[in-house]
Image (spheres, rainbow, N blue to C red):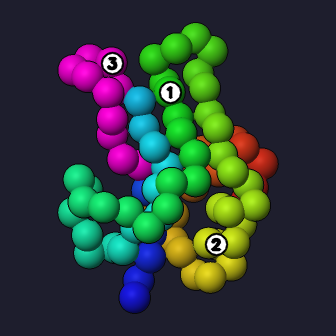
Amino acid sequence: MSVKIRLKRMGTKKRPFYRIVVTESRAAGASKYLEAIGSYSPIVEPKQLVVDQARAAAWLERGAKPTPTVQHLLTKAGLR
């Protein structure tokens, strides 16, 4: 089972926010996910980033691959 950490878009039209979720790599973007480990709101000022660092580190140790955008956000959060 290949696992990815990626963003899931939520919110309304022109007011997005994202959940940082752990999901299977072949699953569709709107499908169920294994676990939500954080959120990201780019619209509010200042931008809001919340990450459960313990859970994110646990998934990364198990071999979950973050997408490039999530990799950048995890770096901002001080995880990688």
The quadrant of the image that shows the N terminus is: bottom left
- Where disc 3 sits, the SS reads strand
Could you tell me residue 78's position as x and y percent?
Answer: 78, 48
**On the image, numbered disc 3 is attached to which residue?**
15
**On the image, numbered disc 2 is attached to which residue?**
60
Magenta segment: 7-16
Earlier along the polypeptide chain: callout 1 or callout 2?
1
Residue farthest to the top?
Answer: 45
**Position of residue 8 in the picture relative to residue 78 (left or right):** left
Local packing at callout 1 (Cα closer than 10 Å; few below 14, some 14-19, many 20+) is: some
Establish if 58 lies above or below 76: below
How many numbered badges does the structure rendering display?
3
Residues tagged 3 and 2 counted as in contact (Cβ below 8 A): no
Residues tagged 1 and 2 counted as in contact (Cβ below 8 A): no
**On the image, numbered disc 1 is attached to which residue?**
41
Earlier along the polypeptide chain: callout 3 or callout 2?
3
Magenta span includes 61: no
